[in-house]
Amino acid sequence: MAQLRYLNPEDLDPADRDVLVRPVNLYRAMANAPGIARAFLGLANEIRHRSRLDPRLREIAILRIAWLTRSAYEWSHHVKIGRDFGVTDSDVALAMDPATATGAEGAVLRAATGIAEGDGTLPEATLAGLRGHLAEDALTELLLIAALYVGLARFIRAAAIEVEPDYEPELHAFPLPAG
């Protein structure tokens, strides 16, 4: 059960209803703090539509973080969202088990793993691998996006945000391990 109230547009001051542009549970919970929700939505929009990082690589990184943090909400949403950015079933499988990942995908998955696990420090070899595939702006965005999604996964867990029925099929197609 969610630990924050899910708000609807009628629960908000008319000036704050824009934070429910997508009435998903995450935004409905964030709407309890409309100023921060609006700022988060601006950042999310920037990431999704204006980032220099290849969107498929971005989604693979987010999926790896969702997998490692066991965030059913992030996982289900980004399996579905990732399809719009070219993510395939094979890409989802790599996010689950990146042992065979090579090239840009392998470098991005190693970085996402490093940021999500331990203290977030990345070995120089991981950074060098990224630099072989990404320009400095895209590399910077990857590190920021990965750190943001680790934090978002923790917020989702703390607030016990529930997966909406429209996203549950993704959990059945690609279930997260228990734990």
Image (cartoon, rainbow, N blue to C red):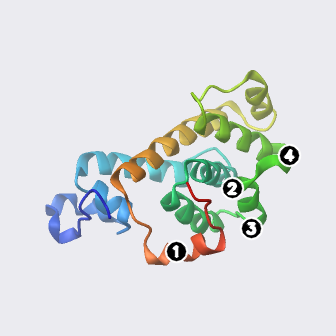
| Mark 1–mark 4 distance (CA, rounded to whole Å) | 30 Å
Who comes first in sequence, dot 2 or dot 4? Answer: 2
Q: Few, some or many C-alpha atoms within 10 Å of disc 4 (few <14, some 14-19, many ≥20)?
A: few
Residue in the image at 16% along x and 71% along y: 10
Who comes first in sequence, dot 1 or dot 4? Answer: 4
| Mark 4–mark 3 distance (CA, rounded to whole Å) | 16 Å
| Mark 2–mark 4 distance (CA, rounded to whole Å) | 15 Å
Residue in the image at 58% along x and 70% along y: 171
User: Residue beneath label 4, please?
Assistant: 102
In percent of width and height, residue 116 lies at 59, 39
Reply above or below: 30 against 137: below
Judge from the rendering whether residue 160 lies leftward or rightward of residue 90; answer left or right: left
User: Residue beneath label 1, please?
Assistant: 168
| Mark 3–mark 1 distance (CA, rounded to whole Å) | 16 Å
Judge from the rendering whether residue 49 lies leftward or rightward of residue 105; answer left or right: left
Q: Quadrant of the N terminus?
A: bottom left
| Mark 1–mark 2 distance (CA, rounded to whole Å) | 22 Å
Q: Give the secondary structure at mark 1.
A: helix
Q: Quadrant of the C terminus?
A: bottom right
Closer to the camera in the image, 46 or 99: 99
Judge from the rendering whether residue 63 lies leftward or rightward of residue 73; answer left or right: right
User: Residue beneath label 2, please?
Assistant: 56
Who comes first in sequence, dot 3 or dot 2? Answer: 2
Q: Few, some or many C-alpha atoms within 10 Å of disc 2 (few <14, some 14-19, many ≥20)?
A: some
Who comes first in sequence, dot 3 or dot 1? Answer: 3
Contact, CB < 8 Å: mark 3 with mark 1? no
Hey, which quadrant is residue 49 in on the image? bottom right
Q: Few, some or many C-alpha atoms within 10 Å of disc 3 (few <14, some 14-19, many ≥20)?
A: few
User: Residue beneath label 3, please?
Assistant: 89
